[in-house]
Structure formats: structure tokens, C-alpha cells
Image: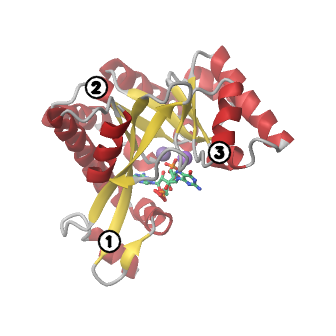
Amino acid sequence: HALHRALSRAVERGELTLHYQPQVWLDHGGIVGVEALLRWQHPELGAVAPAEFIPVAEDSGLIVSIGEWVLQAALHQLRRWRDEGVPCPRVAVNLSMAQFRQPDLVARVRAALQAADVPPQGLELELTEGVLLHDAEAAQATVRALRALGVHLSIDDFGTGYSSLAQLRRFAVQRIKIDRSFVADLPHDAEAEAIVDLIVMLAQRLGLETLAEGVEQPQQAQALLARGCRLAQGYAFARPLPAAECARWLRAQA
Ligand code: G
Ligand code: G
Ligand code: MN
Ligand code: NA
């Protein structure tokens, strides 16, 4: 597979970069953190979309080494921002299933935090619902160990996967990210409203925060806040931005 061959060299050739998308409090606009999102610029292919290359990386196992690079790069960026006085409490990193299942994941995360000199509270790991389904015993142990280390955990794309409500109770994450497909149909679609209501209510009862993804319009932000969702991310606030632009955005907000 040509894409796979190209991707396998992307890290060493420095073709991967991270963009950062701010996450904000809906009520007062304060900054919660940023999500690190991979970008790949290939010399001949140009910009390859994550939707195209992440599945290739996942199927081939390359996601483990790429994900390790993402973790280190995101934490070093946060370190630089802190040194420069850029206000950013936390960076969120997407963790794929294969990474989550590495036996030495917790040690790797601890080492990456130490290498970047970032406290565990400065890192959030975004898990997918699939992570919770597979080998529930081992997954619970990993989640507990990560929490004990002090990193924040969230469930990404919530509502699109197959996890049951019972799984949420067993896994000690702090936050649910409401998938943008539900947010897209707010505020006037009764079914989308019902689903968002259900997720927010469930989260509140379990003591979890909710963050809405893909908020593009102020009316969506208002509808979410009215329904008890306090955190958001989306084009209404900022697109995923190159580090320098994100730093300017963060400074301007503070
Ligand atoms: O960045 P959007 O712009 O297109 O990202 C598309 C998809 O790629 C999202 O589902 C996102 O979770 C995933 N993605 C982006 N960056 C990373 C990453 O560093 N690791 C993993 N595993 N997935 C990522
Ligand atoms: O990891 P996750 O699946 O949450 O990835 C976030 C994805 O959502 C990225 O592809 C990012 O570019 C995209 N995204 C971020 N904000 C918006 C938005 O307001 N609208 C839409 N349609 N996509 C968004
Ligand atoms: Mn994500
Ligand atoms: Na998502």
C-alpha cells in the first residue's frame, strides 16, 4: 500500500505536524485547554486528510509510533507555551485503541510528561468508546492507573460507538465529548435535543463534565449551555490552528 509506505517514513522525515483547537467554557469563555490534531504534509501528495491516513495508521499498527510522537510533540508544545507565558492549562491528545492496549502505556505517558516537564494535570487523553469495550478488565486497570498518575481522561465521539451506559459508570473518566453529529442538528431538531439532554443528564448524575464538539454557531452554544453542557470546541470559537496562530488566539482570549 503506497500510502502506508509513505506514512511509515512521515515521522522521521518531519512531515507530521500538530494543529491545536481551543476548548472553552461556554458561560464565561475561559480556556480549558486545546486538542492536538494531526496533520500530514506529504512532499508529492500534499496535505493528506486525517480521515484518510489515520485508518491506514491504525490498521497497520503505525499509529503506535505516530501516537507516541504526537504525545511527545503536544507535551513539548505545552512546555514551550508555559515558558512563553501563553495561557493554556492543558493539552488533549487522541489515543487510539492500539496505543491504549500497550502494556507499558502508563510508563510511556509518565516518561513523556517527565521529558517535557509537564505535570500530569496538563495532559488529557481522549479515549474512544471502543477502548472501553475491548477486554473490559484490562481496560479498567489501565484507566485506573492513568487516573492514579493524575492525567485527565475523556471519552471522545460519545454516542456514536457501542458502549453501554453501564460502561461509563465503571470507567473513571472525567469528561464525555458529545459527538458533533448531535451538535450539528441543534437547536431546532427535537431528536438531537433529546439525545444531548440524555447525555448531559447522565453525565451530571455520574459526576462527569460534558464537552460539545463541532459547535459552529452561537445558537448551538446557547442551546448547549441551556441544557447544562458547560464546555465546547468548534469553529464558532476557533478552528484547529497551527501552534503559532493558536498561541496568538490564546493570548488574545486571556
Ligand atoms: O483533525 P480532524 O481534523 O480531521 O481529525 C479527524 C479524525 O482524526 C478525528 O476523529 C480525530 O480524532 C483523528 N485524529 C486527529 N489527530 C489524531 C491523533 O493524533 N491520534 C489519533 N489516534 N487520532 C487523531
Ligand atoms: O478527535 P475528534 O474526532 O473529536 O476530532 C475532531 C475533529 O472535528 C477534527 O476533524 C476537527 O477538524 C473537527 N472539527 C473541529 N471543530 C469542528 C466544527 O466546528 N465543525 C466540524 N464540522 N468539524 C469540526
Ligand atoms: Mn478528539
Ligand atoms: Na470527536
On-image quarter of the N terminus: bottom left
Residue drawn at point x = 40 percent, y = 36 percent: 125
What SS does tag 2 mark? helix
Q: Where does the image place residue 86, in percent across and percent down from the top left?
A: 24, 36
Ligand 1 is in which quadrant of the figure?
bottom left
What SS does tag 1 mark? strand
Q: Is residue 12 something one can see in this rendering? A: yes
The mark that comes first in sequence, 3 or 1, is 1
Residue drawn at point x = 31 percent, y = 22 percent: 149
Residue 145, quarter of picture = top left
What SS does tag 3 mark? loop
Q: Residues within 10 Å of mark 3 (few under 14, many from 20)?
A: few
Q: Which residue is identified by label 3? A: 161
The amino acid marked with disc number 2 is Pro
The amino acid marked with disc number 1 is Gln
Q: Which residue is identified by label 1? A: 41
Q: Which residue is identified by label 2? A: 120
Front one among 25 and 121: 25
On the picture, is 246 further left or further right than 222? left
Q: Where does the image place residue 117, in percent across and percent down from the top left?
A: 15, 31
